[in-house]
Amino acid sequence: MIPVAHYLSSKRLTVVTAVLVSTISFSALAWQPSGKVECIAPSDPGGGWDFTCRNVANVLKDLSLIPGTMQTTNMAGAGGGVAFAHTISKRSKDDKVIVAASTATTTRLAQKQFPGMKAEMVEWLGSVGADYGIIAVLKDSPYKTLPDLLEASKKDPRAVKYAGASARGGWDHLKVLIAAKAGGVENLPHIPYLSYNNGGEALTQIVGGQVDAFTGDVSEATGFLESGDIRVLAVLAPERLPGKFSDIPTAKEQGIDAVAPNWRGFYMPAGASEEAKAFWGDAIDKVYASEQWKQVMKTSGLIPFENDEGSFDEFIRAQVTDIEELSREIGLLK
């Protein structure tokens, strides 16, 4: 079994039902955005980063935290690397841009997939919740449970073909390997995995019959679940999700000890003004604590998420280190 426990250590990461809201008052801040404000989603429309930008933008507007509307700019490529490089090189001092990020971002950084770039080259603002990973199949798939699916891979690692939004070795791919290793599958590098620009595109491959299974997050699959096109075999969470997702079994209750949360949050240019960094950090806190965002979380399958040790920046650096160790253990890094 992959020791995911150290990676999900309660000393670094706690899923809770409440969040401490910053005590900084907006009226006391010296800087507030004016004119165009922008959120970069490092994916095509339909993915988790796009979901994060667009929904947070709506709540920022509803709470009157920004003037007018926030523009979402889709910037797919290199598993988030294009947006990361753009932020560093082209927007290094921009006070009015934030960028959607997730565990997929820290995974790519941990695996040195953004050449010459490191986590400390941007300002990490905070998280707004977490998706838990899922493994899903077509509604009429012969695989009825996660053990069924993994048993096929145990007999032949190439038997089940997966699709996800991250690049090979990225977080969506790691979810498959975490579950497969926990299920006793050997020759993990031989498991077929196809990468797409976003979760929506990967899911269409399932519906079209090009692949056998989807690996991604609950929020990406909500529309396909509601339409009945897919069936989720397992959520990679410590316990069942609340609300309309409560009928999805966990991997753990099926005897597969695999847990894989994907936090969702933001970073911004490291060279932005301190006033802008304070503003956006406080704005993200206020969005997260709002009733509007709680409703978004309820309908999308996000759950509360808060790192309980130090700043978000410290959490990010610790997670990069942990994922690097995890990647080495399963052979993705030397």
Image (tube, grey):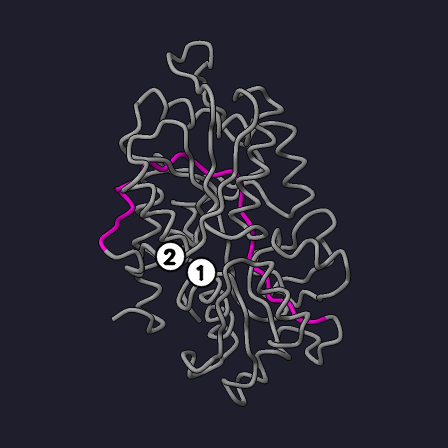
**Label 2, label 1: how far apart the Cα atoms are:** 6 Å
For label 1, the crowd category at 10 Å Cα-Cα, with few meaning under 14, some 14 to 19 and many 20 or more, is many
* Magenta span main SS: strand
Give the position of the N terminus as an image quadrant.
bottom left
**163 relative to 42 in the view: left or right:** right
Q: Amino acid at mark 1?
A: Trp
Q: Whole-percent x and y of residue 239? A: 61, 55
Residue on which the image places disc 2? 107
Residue matched to label 1: 171
Could you say where residue 156 lies in the image, as x and y percent from the top left?
52, 89
Name the outermost residue toward the left.
116
- Residue at 64% x, 34% y is 294
Residue 43 lies in the magenta-colored region: no
Q: Residue furthest top?
A: 28
Q: Regarding mark 2 in the picture, which secondary structure is present there?
A: helix
The region drawn magenta spans 116-138
Q: Which numbered disc flags the more N-terminal residue, 2 or 1?
A: 2
Would you say 302 lies left or right of 182 here?
right
Amino acid type shown at disc 2: Thr
